[in-house]
Image (cartoon, rainbow, N blue to C red):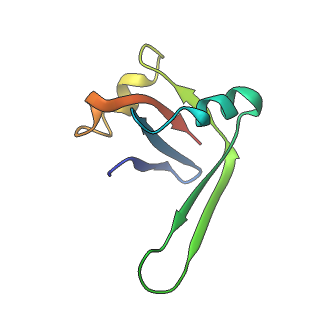
Amino acid sequence: MDSFRVVSENRVLWLNVTGSGNETAAHLLENNRITIMFCAFEGAPNILRLYGKGKEIKEGDTSWNDLINLFPKLQERVRYLILL
């Protein structure tokens, strides 16, 4: 699924779609912290973790239109975006 974008040198964007659960939003409300983990499923067992503070962006927020257009194929299934 094409749900991750590097927005700038220090910013990434993750698209949360329906059916993925909503624990991430609950954790962001609690303390704004988020960890995104990438795992290699082929080759060497590599793991990359991105740590930071996250911000939930919902439809209607000022930056929604600019950011959702980075995901043209998945817009219909979007629950919210997370900017890290």
Looking at the picture, how far across and down is residue 61, in whole percent?
48, 16
In the displayed structure image, the side of residue 20 where residue 26 appears, left or right: right
Query: Which residue is situated farthest in the bottom direction here?
Result: 44
Query: Which residue is situated farthest in the left direction here?
Result: 73
Query: Which residue is situated farthest in the right direction here?
Result: 31
What residue is shown at x 30% (from left), y 39% (from top)?
A: 71
The answer to whether 64 is drawn above or below residue 39 in the figure is above
The number of discs equals: 0
The answer to whether 22 is drawn above or below residue 61 in the figure is below
Q: Quadrant of residue 19?
A: top left
What residue is shown at x 48% (from left), y 74% (from top)?
A: 40
Looking at the picture, how far across and down is residue 32, in whole percent?
71, 34
In the displayed structure image, the side of residue 17 where residue 31 appears, left or right: right
- Is residue 26 or residue 33 the one in the foreground? 26
Looking at the picture, how far across and down is residue 65, in whole percent?
36, 23
What residue is shown at x 47% (from left), y 21% (from top)?
A: 58
Specify the quadrant that holds the C terminus: top right
- Is residue 61 or residue 77 the one in the foreground? 77
What residue is shown at x 42% (from left), y 23% (from top)?
A: 64
